[in-house]
Amino acid sequence: MREEWLDRELAGALERLELSGSSILVACSGGLDSVSLARLLCAVSAQWRLTVSVGHIDHGLRGAESEADRRSVRDLARNLSVPFHVAEVDPRAHQSGHSSRTRPTLQEAARELRYLALLDLADRSGADCVATAHTANDQAETVLMRMLRGTSPDGLAGIPARSFEGRVVRPILGIERSILEERALREGWTWREDSSNQSDEYARNRLREHWLPGLAADFNPALVRALCRLADAQRADSEWLGEALAGEIRHRLERRGNWLYIAGEDWEGLPRAMALRIARTALESCGVARDITRMHLERIVAFLRRGKRGRVLELPGGVRLERHADQWRMGPVTGRVAEEPAGDAGA
């Protein structure tokens, strides 16, 4: 029964993602989830007119284990009779290219380089998109982790089934890992286990191995599904709000040189939730994302509503907000400001 449901869920995801007739590069680490995704897509490739290939990114972080992962994925592609593509990345070198304030963690650096490398492999191989093997468990873990650390309502939307630019799709996001494992064991599929996933050094591993199972046992056996439903509901709300937000952003924000100009009227009458979202967009447009907190957004909105001429609000990332004529502007604290272009301002 659960396996029949798996096939229906996969078919529904392929339809919702409009993947019929697509060329898909499957991101495959060699683990259970990505091996299952590759095999499932190959099994329905004729029905959905899919052209499937397999891509593997070697981070070089686990020595002989990394080499074994590469060989395993290569052998999988050969067994499935699909093309195999591989790229090497160096997360540690990527870390060293940042200042101490902006330096990503090793996991963040690996994730960023992995997506860039996968998209490059897709471009070079002619694939329309990259399919990653995020499951319902990954969705639940992401939502719960964000709740524990503190997040905005938008953060509760979790992982999208399709990335913002549309190049990355996640066809098994609605399927629990236990269902994939049942299919894999029945079919005799083999996969590799990443030893780093067993380490309690990482918070996400502790959540996966201890916290989520404990909460499921004590409060809700269907906790993964409940968290996924929360993410789905919040994403629907966020998409609805996003349409209204896009209109306000076009009306209120304008890039000129090194400064982002912000229309000064009617901030008192703007709903607080919308004002906070505009403030976040403004900071992100100035290159500040990692250091944004709720406190910063609240301070920006209060400043836009009540700040006086001549006052300056210092913000993370070398950014400040100040009154400029009948507008506000947000931009660099130090350094020469580029000359503002004459005529219509460009982005």
Image: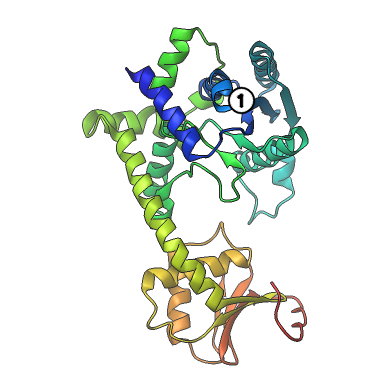
Q: Could you tell whether 76 is left or right of 34 in the image?
A: right
In the depicted structure, whether residue 320 falls above or below residue 154? below
Residue 41, quarter of picture = top right
Q: Residue at x 47, y 13 (%)?
A: 184
Is residue 240 something one can see in this rendering? yes
Q: Residue at x 70, y 18 (%)?
A: 67
How are the residues colored? Answer: rainbow
Q: Position of residue 7 (x, y in %)?
A: 42, 23
- Closest to the observer: 20 or 30? 20
- Closest to the observer: 152 or 14? 14
Residue projecting furthest to the left? 219
Give amino acid for label 1.
Ser
Q: Could you tell whether 274 is left or right of 87 in the image?
A: left
Q: Residue at x 37, y 45 (%)?
A: 232
In the rendered image, the quadrant that contains the N terminus is top left
Residue 214, quarter of picture = top left
Badge 1 crowding class, 10 Å Cα cut-off, few under 14, some 14 to 19, many 20 or more, is: many
Badge 1 element: loop
In the depicted structure, whether residue 3 falls above or below residue 87? above
Q: Position of residue 289 (x, y in %)?
A: 57, 59
Q: Could you tell whether 15 is left or right of 97 in the image?
A: left
Residue, disc 1 = 29
Q: Position of residue 145 (x, y in %)?
A: 41, 43
Residue 282, quarter of picture = bottom right
- Closest to the observer: 25 or 292? 25
Is residue 296 something one can see in this rendering? no
In the rendered image, the quadrant that contains the C terminus is bottom right
Q: Residue at x 56, y 50 (%)?
A: 164
In the depicted structure, whether residue 256 falls above or below residue 163? below
- Closest to the observer: 45 or 3? 45
Q: Could you tell whether 229 is left or right of 30 in the image?
A: left
Q: Position of residue 231 (x, y in %)?
A: 38, 45
